């Protein structure tokens, strides 16, 4: 079982096999399968688990796996796909030469991040870790995604390479959109020098890219072939929960919160937002009865309200000021067989916590220093007002008249 796995993913073990259920798809990984294991029964159990969730699945078979595994998968209905080499390169000492011309870390040319995203996400691959999947996994939020770009003569991004550094002891090459020899060598050398001790770099490739990696100091360790199977039915179109990407979700959403609610973060600015309309504000410590676990009770009330006030399939966004946020489907999280709801809840424990819909029509705003909870949106207010008043007493502020935002 992995020590870490992405938000919104359910991980389950069946002996040496580890399944990852993303909702949209699934994967199978395993340590060496013991001799004499009933492979057909093992495969059938995994198919049943993915069929129950309606998830298509990819099973990677390596050159050192049992030679019987591939035929058993094929007999069970899996389709054999691409085959690639698995390549490895050891760490390098810190560089003394200047960085190669035209190759930059993406964060050094952030103004071109949108262009880089489009190039990486639109590259057909196959890649070991598709760029969009890597971002959805939330690795970028943790600062362990390494993205390099190649600038053309016009100064614009023309190629992208990405790797993931949290799969210790390896840095995993996610993909490269170009097999330009200089670009491949520059990117992989940077990744091999990423920390003081260095770490081995692992890649999957075939064709010209494989040749370039071998020229850059990689050695072939084994091979890997993809096998895929899809059950009947239509898989979910989105993960039930995931990190918010700084480029497409987190940053733009915060920009709208600042503009629409006149957000002024400060330990002395109380209130910190212009209360939306309609809205009500409760003092989190005005209750007159003993509440053994106020954060848990508060969060349970808000979650029931969000479930009632949002549309089926609609995501709720959880924001934590100056920290990573999440989005989640309240109908597909926190239930048996589903991933836990991400985020730290509703009670503002040391920072501003928000729950809101993407169109900002309803939500909650927790102020950690004023110690208040603002709830806005008619449907959400109707769902939670009675319970919040019973828990916290009457609201200390209300707004029912329209207010002009963004001025």
Image (cartoon, grey):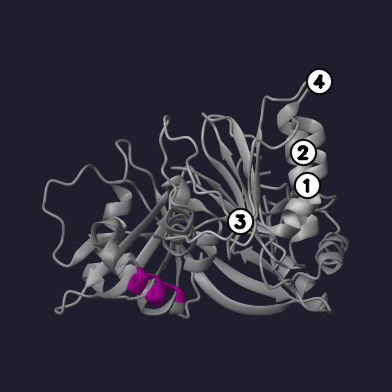
Residue 335 seen: yes
Please state the extent of the stretch shown in magenta in the rendering: 114-121
Dot 3 alpha-carbon crowd within 10 angstroms: few under 14, some 14 to 19, many 20 or more = some
Is 118 part of what is drawn in magenta?
Answer: yes
Q: Nearer the viewer, residue 68 or 151?
A: 151
Q: Name the mark on residue 384.
A: 1
Residue 388 is marked as 2
Residue neighbourhood size for the residue with mark 1, other residues' Cα within 10 Å, grouped as few (<14), some (14–19), many (≥20):
many
Whole-percent x, y for residue 193 in the image: 28, 46
Instruction: Look at discs 1 and 3 and give the one toward the viewer.
Output: 3
Give the quarter of the figure containing the C terminus.
bottom left
Question: Which quadrant is home to the N terminus?
Answer: top right
Report the Cα–Cα distance between label 2 and label 4: 13 Å
Q: Earlier in the sequence, mark 4 or mark 3?
A: 3
* Image point (44%, 48%), residue name: 263
Along the line of sight, the residue nearer the viewer: 269 or 26 = 269
């Amino acid at each position: 079982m992995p020590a870490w796995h992405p938000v919104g993913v359910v991980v389950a073990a069946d002996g040496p096999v580890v399944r990852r259920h993303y909702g949209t798809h699934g994967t199978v990984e395993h340590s060496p399968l013991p001799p004499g294991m009933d492979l057909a029964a093992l495969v059938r159990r995994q198919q049943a688990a993915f069929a129950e969730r309606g998830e298509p699945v990819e099973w990677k078979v390596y050159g050192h796996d049992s030679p019987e595994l591939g035929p058993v998968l094929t007999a069970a209905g899996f389709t054999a796909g691409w085959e690639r080499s698995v390549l490895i390169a050891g760490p390098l000492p810190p560089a003394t030469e200047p960085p190669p011309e035209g190759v930059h870390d993406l964060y050094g040319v952030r103004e071109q991040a949108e262009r880089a995203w489009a190039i990486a996400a639109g590259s057909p691959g196959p890649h070991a870790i598709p760029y969009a999947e890597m971002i959805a996994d939330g690795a970028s939020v943790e600062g362990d995604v390494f993205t390099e770009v190649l600038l053309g003569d016009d100064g614009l991004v023309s190629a992208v390479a990405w790797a993931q550094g949290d799969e210790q002891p390896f840095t995993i090459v996610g993909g490269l959109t170009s097999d330009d020899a200089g670009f491949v060598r520059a990117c992989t050398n940077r990744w091999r020098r990423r920390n003081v001790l260095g770490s081995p770099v692992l890649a999957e490739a075939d064709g010209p890219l494989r040749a370039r990696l071998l020229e850059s100091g990689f050695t072939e360790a084994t091979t890997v072939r993809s096998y895929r199977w899809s059950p009947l039915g239509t898989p979910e179109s989105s993960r039930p929960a995931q990190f918010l990407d700084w480029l497409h979700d987190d940053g733009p959403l915060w920009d709208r919160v600042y503009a629409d609610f006149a957000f002024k973060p400060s330990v002395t600015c109380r209130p910190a937002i212009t209360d939306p309309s309609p809205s009500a504000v409760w003092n989190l410590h005005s209750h007159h009865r003993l509440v053994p676990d106020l954060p848990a009770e508060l969060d349970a009330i808000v979650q029931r309200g969000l479930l009632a006030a949002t549309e089926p399939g609609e995501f709720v966004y959880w924001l934590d000021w100056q920290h990573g946020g999440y989005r989640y489907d309240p109908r597909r999280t926190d239930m048996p067989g589903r991933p836990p709801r991400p985020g730290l809840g509703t009670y503002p424990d040391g920072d501003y916590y928000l729950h809101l819909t993407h169109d900002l029509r309803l939500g909650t705003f927790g102020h950690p220093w004023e110690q208040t909870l603002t709830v806005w949106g008619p449907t959400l207010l109707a769902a939670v007002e009675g319970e919040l008043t019973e828990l916290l007493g009457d609201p200390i502020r209300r707004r029912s008249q329209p207010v002009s935002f963004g001025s």
